[in-house]
């Protein structure tokens, strides 16, 4: 019953909160910083100069063992003290591009940068090591959804709060509050060991992230086609199609999304009654993307896409 209610609500976030676009001055706790992604902003070294004074920003991998590793430290994160001009650029362009996030923590640049360098790996329950990259806002959202506050403090201290763009609607910003106490005490930042329960929670958070994004992207497609959708019915459709994709062996997220598109945009009858499509759905020895492309070609031969529909 709980799962049905969660689906009906559209896989809402449980711990990471949705907020309005931030504005200057940024609210505490902690001192405000921007952590910008050099990989997503290729000319960041030039763009930062008119927005941040010398000494007010630092490349995270500069001065570390990774400084001269490929593709170079300027393809990594850059930490910059927040100011009105820098925040305006971030809110207008870099934030909606998911090219960085806002951090709140200590006011000393060098000590914060040193701590950010150390947030790199988590230990899995089987003893293997899992990488963490500040550039991966999806993984940040999943960790915020799956782990307890003590675990988040252990992993991210001395950062107290983070804000980033969801990657969905332009006005959808996300916030993860780790410690809002004025008397903040930095936690132990040794490697965080995950339990099998933690990993199950992370898997659930990853699936919920995927379903939220599928709902947004496929909903945008339907809207562009002139379709009228009722949210509850649409969410149930997506959940059903996602389960079907799993039964058919489409494990890769891109493949699952492709399957969901085919189910939404073509009539149901060919999937049930056409032998060629039915056999392709069951033949898991063939790579998923190849099967989906062949199914798409077959659908175009024997059917027509639904150009406008009401969600059932």
Image (tube, rainbow, N blue to C red):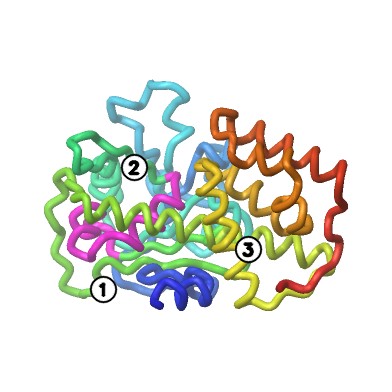
Q: Is residue 5 above or below residue 101?
A: below
Quadrant in which the N terminus is drawn: bottom left
- Residue at x 52%, y 41% (from the top left corner): 249
SS at badge 3: helix
User: Which residues fall within the magenta stretch?
Assistant: 135-160
List the residue tagged with mark 2.
Answer: 132
Q: Is residue 60 left or right of residue 257?
A: left
Give coordinates of residue 83: x percent, y percent.
Answer: 47, 61
Badge 2 density bin: few <14, some 14–19, many ≥20, Cα 10 Å: few
Q: Main secondary structure of the magenta part?
A: helix
Q: Is residue 25 visible?
A: no
Residue at disc 2, secondary structure: loop
Quarter-wise, where is residue 101 in the image? bottom left
Q: Nearer the viewer, residue 211 or 306?
A: 306
Pointer 1 residue: 180
Label 2 to label 1: alpha-carbon separation: 24 Å
- Badge 1 crowding class, 10 Å Cα cut-off, few under 14, some 14 to 19, many 20 or more, is few
- The first of marks 2 and 1 along the sequence is 2
């Amino acid at each position: 019953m709980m799962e049905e209610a969660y689906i009906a609500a559209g896989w809402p976030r449980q711990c990471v909160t949705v907020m309005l676009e931030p504005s200057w001055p940024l609210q505490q706790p902690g001192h405000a910083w921007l952590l910008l992604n050099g990989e997503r902003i290729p000319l960041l070294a030039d763009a930062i100069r008119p927005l941040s004074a010398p000494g007010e920003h630092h490349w995270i991998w500069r001065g570390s063992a990774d400084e001269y590793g490929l593709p170079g430290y300027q393809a990594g994160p850059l930490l910059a003290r927040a100011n009105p001009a820098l925040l305006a650029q971030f809110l207008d362009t870099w934030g909606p591009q998911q090219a960085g996030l806002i951090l709140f923590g200590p006011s000393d640049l060098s000590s914060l940068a040193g701590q950010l360098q150390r947030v790199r790996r988590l230990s899995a329950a089987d003893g293997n090591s899992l990488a963490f990259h500040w550039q991966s806002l999806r993984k940040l959202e999943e960790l915020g959804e799956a782990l307890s506050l003590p675990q988040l403090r252990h992993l991210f201290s001395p950062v107290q709060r983070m804000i980033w763009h969801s990657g969905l609607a332009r006005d959808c910003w996300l916030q993860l509050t780790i410690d809002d106490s004025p008397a903040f005490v930095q936690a132990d930042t040794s490697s965080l060991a995950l339990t099998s329960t933690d990993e199950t929670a992370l898997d659930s958070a990853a699936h919920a992230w995927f379903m939220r994004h599928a709902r947004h992207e496929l909903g945008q497609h339907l809207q562009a086609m002139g379709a009228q959708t009722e949210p509850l019915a649409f969410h149930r459709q997506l959940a059903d199609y996602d389960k079907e994709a799993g039964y058919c062996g489409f494990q890769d997220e891109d493949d699952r999304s492709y399957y969901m598109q085919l189910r939404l945009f073509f009539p149901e009858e060919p999937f049930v009654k056409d032998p060629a499509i039915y056999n392709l759905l069951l033949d898991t020895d063939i790579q998923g993307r190849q099967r989906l492309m062949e199914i798409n070609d077959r659908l175009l031969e024997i059917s027509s896409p639904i150009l406008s529909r009401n969600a059932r």
